[in-house]
């Protein structure tokens, strides 16, 4: 069964600190993996997208890694800011259908305290 | 910023009422989706469309219906709203399937049925 599991479920850190969020997936055949940021009450916004051959991709203070062999990804946030408080969702796409199905994790709720 | 819009953003309505949630995109995308998301939970696909006059049900059973008469417009209708329909509804669209295909989300409609 195609699944996406994220950990931790929630995380509280102090402003300025770094943190790493984890994503494990069983989606096959794999097409790509995205990390989205979802502010409360709003739609998800894409942070990074990685294909099978990509190991690392950065977007400002966000750095995503992908290990396609172990089917694991991480999102590292550097020098956190209050505006980073949001839910971070790992989304994996398969390439086994014309739809290009998206499989969503439940997200990690990050809270940054001053 | 993605050009996909949902209205209304918030809706409080009485049981038994008929409602239509609007979703429009100006990117010319053929694929459009409706997701349902409860607080702290993952997004569940309830409807999708490959193009005009194409609609399919998603993974999560829903009493709602959709239509796709125009490429840019993908409304969702509930004939008789119930408290169990209270949730956030997110609309998304994506370009033709490819390695880097990305889904763009609207801001969501938070529906409360009292």
Image (cartoon, coloured by chain):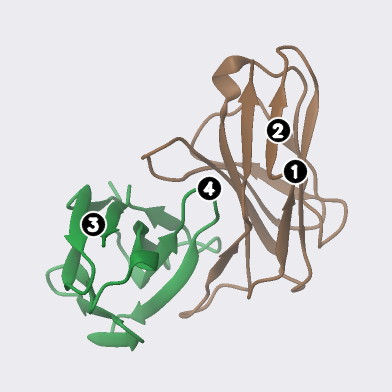
Q: Write down which chain is painted brown.
A: B
Q: Are marks 3 and 2 in contact (CB under 8 Å)?
A: no
Q: Quadrant of residue A47?
A: bottom left
Q: Are marks 1 and 4 in contact (CB under 8 Å)?
A: no
Q: Seen in the image, is A7 located left or right of residue B32? A: left
Q: Residue at x 20, y 53 (%)?
A: A11
| Quarter of the view holding residue A15 | bottom left
Q: Identify the residue at image location x=54%, y=29%.
A: B61
Residue placed most toward the observer, A19 or A23: A19
Q: Which residue is mark 2?
A: B11
CB atoms of marks 3 and 1 within 8 Å: no
Q: Residue B91: horizontal and vertical position, in percent? A: 63, 52
> Which quadrant would residue A64 be assigned to in this image?
bottom left
Identified at 32% across, 71% down, the residue is A81
Vertical comparison of B64 with B43: above or below? above
Badge 1 is on which residue?
A: B8
Q: Is residue B97 visible?
A: yes
Q: Name the secondary structure under disc 1.
A: loop
- Name which of mark 4 and mark 3 comes first in the sequence: 3
Whether discs 2 and 4 lie on one chain: the answer is no
Say which mark, if any, is on residue A26.
Answer: 3
Residue under label 4, please give it.
A41
Task: Report which colour depicts chain A.
Answer: green
Task: Give the x, y percent position of residue A55.
Answer: 22, 85
In the image, farthest residue toward the front: A114
Mark 4 to mark 3: distance in Å? 29 Å
Secondary-structure class at tag 2: strand
Please, what secondary structure does the residue beneath circle 3 have?
loop
Q: CA distance from mark 3 to mark 2?
A: 37 Å
Circle 2/circle 1 CB separation < 8 Å = yes
| Disc on res. B25 | none
> Dot 1: within a 10 Å radius of its alpha carbon, few (fewer than 14), some, or many (20 or more) residues?
some
């Amino acid at each position: 069964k195609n699944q996406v599991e994220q950990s931790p479920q929630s995380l509280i850190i102090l402003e300025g600190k770094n943190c790493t969020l984890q994503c494990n997936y069983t989606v096959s055949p794999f097409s790509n993996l995205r990390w989205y940021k979802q502010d409360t009450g709003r739609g998800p916004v894409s942070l990074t997208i990685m294909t099978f051959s990509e190991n690392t991709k950065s977007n400002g203070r966000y750095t995503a890694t992908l290990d396609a062999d172990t089917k694991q990804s991480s999102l590292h946030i550097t020098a956190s800011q209050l505006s980073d408080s949001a839910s971070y969702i790992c989304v994996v796409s398969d390439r086994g259908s014309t739809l290009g199905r998206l499989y969503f994790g439940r997200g990690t709720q990050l809270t940054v305290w001053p | 910023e993605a050009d996909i819009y949902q209205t209304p953003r918030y809706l409080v309505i009485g049981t038994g009422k008929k409602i239509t949630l609007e979703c429009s995109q100006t990117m010319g995308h053929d694929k459009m989706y409706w997701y349902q998301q409860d607080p702290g939970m993952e997004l569940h696909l309830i409807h999708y469309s490959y193009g005009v006059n194409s609609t399919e049900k998603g993974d999560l059973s829903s009493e709602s219906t959709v239509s796709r008469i125009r490429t840019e417009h993908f409304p969702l209708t509930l004939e008789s709203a119930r408290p169990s329909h209270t949730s956030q509804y997110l609309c998304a669209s994506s370009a033709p399937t490819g390695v880097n295909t990305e889904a763009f989300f609207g801001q969501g409609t938070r529906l409360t049925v009292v």
